[in-house]
Amino acid sequence: MKLLLLYVHDYWLRPFERSLAQAPEAPPGVETGPAVVALVHVEPHDPEMQDKLVTKAIKNVKWLAGKFETRTVVLHSFAHLAATRAEPVQADALLSAMRTRLTGADYVVHTTPFGWFNEFRLHVAGPSLAKVFVEL
């Protein structure tokens, strides 16, 4: 799993085009103020270690959220951080597990529409710490 974590002042996303035929209808979009945006790339071997990877990913997300004193997180499936990727159903399951764990820890969690190409806008904060790449 690879994560690109960004602390943003604001985030806006709208579904653009279905990328998976079986994707459900998309919600209207996501719009939020200060948040940690987690661009999540799930690799082919990751589902075998899902519980361990979800725990590590959550720790990284919480750490960055704590640094900027936010309880808002956006989870965005982002299959562009490596040449290979897990099957869509596996990636969706891993993101769902992350959402469940973060919500259970009293975070406000937005998940971008899975199986859709999206247009989005981020206003990333300036400090170096606002941009963190993690390879788990």
Image (cartoon, rainbow, N blue to C red):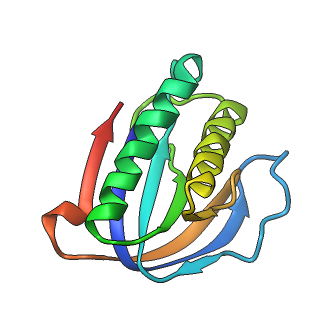
Q: How many marks?
A: 0
Q: Is residue 105 above or below residue 26?
A: above
- Toward the front, the furthest residue is 105
Residue 25 in sight from this viewpoint: yes
Residue 127 position in % (x across, y down): 15, 71
Q: Is residue 96 above or below residue 42?
A: below
Residue 44 in sight from this viewpoint: no
122 sits to left or right of 28? left
| Residue at figure coordinates x 48%, y 46% from the top left | 40
| Residue at figure coordinates x 59%, y 63% from the top left | 109
Q: Which of these two is toward me, 85 or 61?
A: 61
Q: Which of these two is toward me, 29 or 118?
A: 29
Residue 13 position in % (x across, y down): 58, 74
| Residue at figure coordinates x 58%, y 80% from the top left | 31
109 sits to left or right of 79? right
Quadrant of the frame with the C terminus: top left
| Residue at figure coordinates x 67%, y 75% from the top left | 29
